[in-house]
Amino acid sequence: MVKIVVDAMGGDNGSAIVVEAINNFLKDYSDVELTVVGKKEELESLEGKVRILDARDVVPMEAGALEVMRLKNSSMMVAIKTMKDEGLDAIVSCGSTGGFLSAATINLKMIPGVKRAALVAPFPTSIKGKYVTILDIGANNENSPEELVQFALMGKLYAQSIYGIEQPKTYLLSNGAEEGKGAPEVKEAYKLLKESNFEGFSGNIEARYALNGDADVVVADGFTGNIFLKSSEGIAKMMSGMIKKAFKRNLWSKLGYLHVRKGMKEMADTMDYKNTGGAMLLGINGNVVKAHGSSDARAFYHALRVAKLLAEKDVVNAIKKGIENA
Amino acid sequence: MVKIVVDAMGGDNGSAIVVEAINNFLKDYSDVELTVVGKKEELESLEGKVRILDARDVVPMEAGALEVMRLKNSSMMVAIKTMKDEGLDAIVSCGSTGGFLSAATINLKMIPGVKRAALVAPFPTSIKGKYVTILDIGANNENSPEELVQFALMGKLYAQSIYGIEQPKTYLLSNGAEEGKGAPEVKEAYKLLKESNFEGFSGNIEARYALNGDADVVVADGFTGNIFLKSSEGIAKMMSGMIKKAFKRNLWSKLGYLHVRKGMKEMADTMDYKNTGGAMLLGINGNVVKAHGSSDARAFYHALRVAKLLAEKDVVNAIKKGIENA
């Protein structure tokens, strides 16, 4: 039985979407024990189905680690503390990214030997149903070559656990495919991975090919990974806007939409981060899932699903063992 | 009369697309003098319309600066030398990016006071017809805060000259909008721009908002800018593939396409780098235009158009003056 603790507050859309997501989640999954933390009067409809912990404070969206740590009675801190004290399997929050990740790291502690935690998310690829694991997409502002090498290892262990890929093809994100391309840290990480005969290391990959379905894992420092994530988001949004405009042009184009609705929905579903359930913080003693701040009930539902999966696949333990043996 | 020298060889598609582009270009513009360098037997159809310089060697696509410099009889080196010796206004090539940019920089020299040249390209935005100037998109592997500040200045001068924007809104590409976000170099550049009261400096911008039409200039180091460029390309290509698939689904979806053809074509045109004519190297004594290696005749036509525009707007001189007065 997987035990998950949920911070019900702090997202852009308040606790209502969290409550809706949990109600839907419990309809689909029964083998899970939920602890939900937040203002109890907002969580009434969950009574009897989950354990409710009352917490009166809400962490503001832009709060940093210090502010979160100070807000001891916030839903976020109570959730983190409960996870730690009771040894629960996973935590989910859609509150302040920086604050949540830092507070979770400080309280749950890093896995021994891990230099830096990394934020990881699955990205859709041109191959239907195939996802690529990209990290770090934003937990750090800079990373050393040694940290990049460890990200490669954690990404590999994640892809092995979650997707069952025996030897994930692992690349460094760079500005050219050839050896010797890239920022100084990338060049050095390339050397280290090559010299250590890192299994599955396949060299550099350009950003334009990262989603073509060849790579299983793509490694970047947190700043670069975040640029990759958000430029992808930006272009996807821009193109979606143009597509909508194209269909709204006139009556005929509106009729045209009826015929391609299914294909377009498939695309929208593939591109929609709400189906992938947010990002996971790897390298921490515990499964930490950060749902998007603007999550709706569907996105939060998938974040819960991901938390359950991480716990069932015991990703934390896989990383612990992998780091020990590295 | 603008004088442009063209390296006709070295692209993925050989000299044929260059010849076709030049023939089309000369139909549309008469106030231009072209010197075309390459194997003269491949340039026959241009005889009488342009000056042809025979050059027997072709620079390989992956050649670096040293190899280019050694290939003295290559079309690329002859073109660069001719530009330098005769003081021509602009040069266009679709050959090896690294080799061309380095050889052009070494031969034409940097504008006094310029620390590093930067590759700049216009990106389409959500606002129809509005482009944002993003630099450096790949001339450098790393940049200091001082170099980023100078990129901001060159980008601003470019946007003023080419788009006639009096005070371009200039941003630093970062992983968050707030001051204090970003890689160490970005944070420091932010400080320098703020302290110097850089006109138009508008703070950090996240990659997802870079193309929403608000920014006129977006500054990044060459590595990060290249990741931005290529992840945008990658997502655009992936989505285009999905759209095509959606329309090819069945007879009805194919019929549906007929009704949205116009809107879709508009989107394709907006997203197609071939309409923007490649990238310009700023900071050099001369207008240097790098067309995409896989340019077709249309893309190369637009590269010629851009070279003409840069020369007419005298961007080099604008940057020279701007750097002097900085």
Image: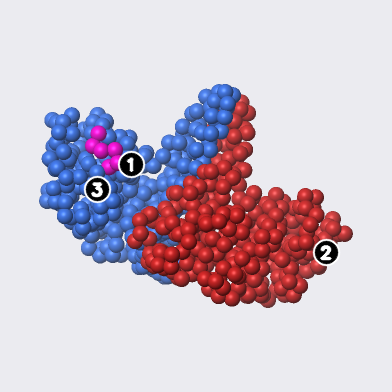
Chain colours: A blue, B red
> Disc 1 on helix, strand or loop?
loop
**Label 3 lies in what chain?**
A
Whether residue B300 is visible, yes or no, is: no
Residue A238, placed above or below residue B200: above
Residue lying furthest right: B48
Q: In x, y percent, where is residue A94?
A: 28, 44
Give amino acid for label 1. Ser
Q: Residue B39 versus residue B190: which sits nearer the camera? A: B190
Instruction: Give the labeled residue for mark 3.
Output: A60
**Label 2 lies in what chain?**
B
Q: Using the rendered view, name the quadrant where residue B47 is placed.
A: bottom right
Mark 2 or 3, closer to the camera: 3
**Dot 1 crowding, Cα within 10 Å, few <14, some 14–19, many 20+:** some
Mark 3 or 1, closer to the camera: 3
The residue stretch that appears in magenta: A11-16
Q: Residue A235 versus residue A120: which sits nearer the camera? A: A235
Instruction: Give the labeled residue for mark 2.
Output: B51
> Disc 3 on helix, strand or loop?
loop
> Disc 2 on helix, strand or loop?
strand
